[in-house]
Image: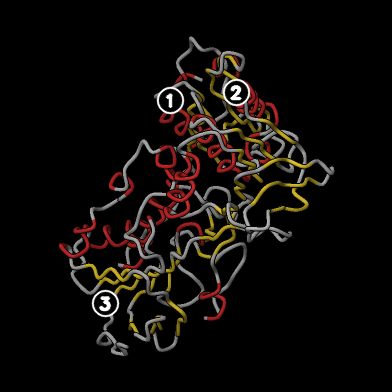
Amino acid sequence: MDNTSFPASDDAMVIIGAGLTGATAAATLREEGFTGPVVLVGAEGQAPYLRPPLSKGFLAGKESEESLLPCPEKWYAENDVELLTSDEAVSVDPTARTVALSSGRSLSYGRLLLATGAVPRQLNLPGTDLQGVYYFRTKTDSQRLHLELAGGGRHLVLIGSGWIGMEVAATARELGNEVTLLGLEEVPMSAAIGPRLGTVFMDRHSEAGVQFRLPASAKEIRGDDAGRVTAVVTDAGETLSADLVVIAIGVVPQTALAEEAGLTIGNGIQVDSGLRTSAEGIFAAGDVASALHPVTGQYARSEHWANAISGGKVAAQSMLGRDAVLDDIPYFYTDQFDLGMEYSGYGALTKDADVVVRGSLEDREFVAFWLREDRVVAGMNVNVWDVQEEIQDLIRSGRAVDRAVLTDPDSDLKTA
């Protein structure tokens, strides 16, 4: 067991969390000319990879492992970034500026980035430990589920009607499996985009043969004598046949290290707009960070790909002592069957906002805008492309818009 420490150094950068945020931060440090030690610590036995394809193209078998990598594996050695995989950080001492690892190694740091991400929310009911029951978060999860689904003909019950549940449902159906989806909402994804727009996706899934039980929850997961899942019993007493079950009911930020180190916590690790935590020399970014947004004036946590990249870049700049602010407009996307969607906006400002549509919900080619006092606070394009720049410009400007121009497909969005 290696108990050696890095030499105490004011410029040693340690990053806990070898995901997209951590990899982006490491790359940014090198791109910005930092030449001191950089250590990237990950609990998974994997080089950093992208998560969005896991429920879509990678799960379908259309995308390779190499396509998931934000940096080729050789990049870390070539850029003198020490990548430690399968070695979990177990404690942080903000006073001594050290990190203890599960291997027994101790790392000294000048600046520390916590990019520990999130883990699937657990479902507390009988049968979750049966063979064929999956939580869905990692590349390994996706690979195992692909092996189960690739041949088609399986009965999959999905518990959870959010983005991941709907994406897995679409992929599973395209692979020739029977799919039933349970969720607490009357319409999938309505918590994020409202029932009117969520119905567009629900209808497309129904056309493809996805069965819905909404609102409904699982009461019990049953299995056979061999310990293999056979059915899901709903709270309405219905028994759904199941060869496979995927639980996708959201995630919770991994804040244990930060809590034990005495950092301020609130729906994640609270950070300012420069991603600085309440402890000197410690920063947080990605899924785990609840960042103060300079536009909304509220703390918010984002679990999406774009935030991982922008957060990694801003964190690296702040670690270098530069003035950097995470002021990006939150962005995410989804692909479900032949529906492609992009969304930009401030979720905190969409509550009770007016939703206006440019295009046709029936044809599934439209742009939806969320308006507060005639100002665009969010926009979503479905099967309409090359409009994200204009949507973000409208949001960023904060100006009152002309609704007639906004909803007219023949009008230039720049003139709204």
Residue 72 percent coordinates (x, y): 23, 53
- Most extreme residue toward the right is 236
Label 3 sits on residue: 11
What's the CA distance linking mark 3 and mark 1?
42 Å
Do callouts 2 and 1 mark residues in contact (Cβ within 8 Å)? no
Give the side of residue 54 with respect to residue 27, left or right.
right
Residue 387 image label: 1
Of callouts 2 and 1, which one flags the residue occurring earlier in the amino acid sequence?
Answer: 2
Q: Give the number of the mark in front: 3 or 2.
A: 2
Tell me what residue is drawn at x 54 percent, y 58 percent. 292
Q: Residues within 10 Å of mark 3 (few under 14, many from 20)?
A: some
Q: Which is nearer the eye, 225 or 377?
A: 225
Q: Closer to the camera: disc 2 or disc 1?
A: 2
Specify the quadrant of the image occupied by residue 47.
bottom left
Q: CA distance from mark 2 to mark 1?
A: 23 Å
- The residue that appears at 30% across and 50% down in the rendered structure is 70
Identify the amino acid type marked 3.
Asp
Residue placed at 42% from the left, 23% from the top? 385
Q: Secondary structure at mark 1?
A: loop
Residue 190 spot, x, y in % from top left: 68, 36
